Image: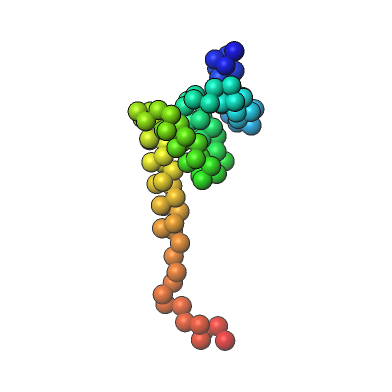
Amino acid sequence: MENKIFQEAVSLFEANKFDEAKKKFEKVVQIDTKNDEAYYYLGKIQNKFQNFGQAINFYNKALELNPDNEHVKYAINIVNNILNISNSLYYENPYTDDDLYE
């Protein structure tokens, strides 16, 4: 049964029906708490919605269950790169003179 639900969830994910896929993957991890691929997909869904903290949590859970999962390692690296880029885009103009605005 779990495998059938997992396959349905993957199909929904591939059809960009992320909310429906999320519910199915959540059901899979309720049935089998050691399904690292379901946690990986839950991380991918959170990543799609730019919920990077939750994505990392799901990816870390998947990696904890299967330390050799290269897809998860790659996904964690991608999220970390996104966060590093967004942090580096903040720019404070050192030439701003507050006296100009009085």
Q: Quadrant of the N terminus?
A: top right
Q: Quadrant of the C terminus?
A: bottom right
Q: Residue at x 47, y 34 (%)?
A: 61
Residue 23 is left or right of residue 96, and the answer is right
Nearer to me, 65 or 43: 65
Give coordinates of residue 88: x percent, y percent: 41, 58
Residue 83, relative to residue 71: is it above or below? below
Q: Is residue 73 visible?
A: yes
Q: Residue at x 44, y 56 (%)?
A: 87
Nearer to me, 41 or 89: 41
Residue 31 occupies which quadrant of the picture?
top right
Residue 47, relative to residue 38: is it above or below? below
Residue 72 occupies which quadrant of the picture?
top left
Q: Residue at x 44, y 72 (%)?
A: 93
Give coordinates of residue 3: x percent, y percent: 54, 15
Give coordinates of residue 24: x percent, y percent: 61, 24
